[in-house]
Amino acid sequence: MFSEFGTRFFFGEKTKNDDGSFNENGGFANNSLEVAPGVFLSYFPTQKFTVLGFIQHAQLIDLGNDFSQNYTALGTGAKYQLSSVLNVEVLYSKFIRGYESGIGQSFNLGLRAIF
């Protein structure tokens, strides 16, 4: 079991048009901070194979842009170590609640190289 605390800061100025729509040249989340704590539970049936489950919450904190967002996701996945440098992973996430976030699900496939 392990946990993480991810953060991202979105730079920029508010870019809303007079009619309330957003400017195509700017993002609606500019000048905001995202904090995303998560807890992961991993099981290692072999030295090369990992099965995992996780829960993660992300909170977008408004820093003057009149926009906030959050979600909570549950997920599962697997990783396989192809070589000492390369692994492949598949993840499924189900967004179980959220505010201004478009609740849904995601399917991810990735290659990770660690040098």
Image: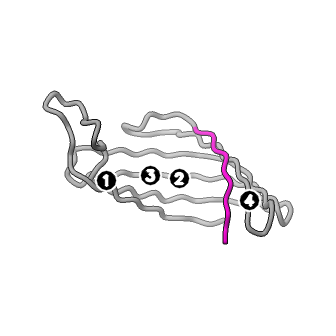
Q: How many numbered marks does the figure carry?
A: 4
Q: Residues within 10 Å of mark 4 (few under 14, many from 20)?
A: some
Q: Position of residue 12 (x, y in %)?
A: 25, 53
At x 47%, y 39%, the residue is 97
- Residue 108 part of the magenta segment: yes
Asked where in the image residue 92 lies, by quadrant, the reply is: top right
State the CA–CA distance, disc 4 to disc 2. 23 Å
Q: Do tag 2 and tag 3 residues touch (Cβ < 8 Å)? A: yes
Q: Position of residue 45 (x, y in %)?
A: 85, 60
State the CA–CA distance, disc 1 to disc 2. 16 Å
Q: Position of residue 4 (x, y in %)?
A: 54, 64
- Asked if residue 85 lies left or right of residue 100, the reply is right
The quadrant of the image that shows the C terminus is bottom right
Most distant residue in the right direction:
46
Q: Do tag 1 and tag 2 residues touch (Cβ < 8 Å)? A: no
**Amino acid type shown at disc 1:** Ile
Residue bearing the label numbered 2? 56
At x 28%, y 43%, the residue is 26
Residue bearing the label numbered 1? 61
Which is in the foreground here, disc 4 or disc 1? Answer: 4
SS of the residue under disc 2: strand
SS of the residue under disc 4: strand
Taking depth in this image into account, of 111 and 56 the one nearest to the observer is: 111
Boundaries of the magenta span: 106-115
Residue bearing the label numbered 4? 87
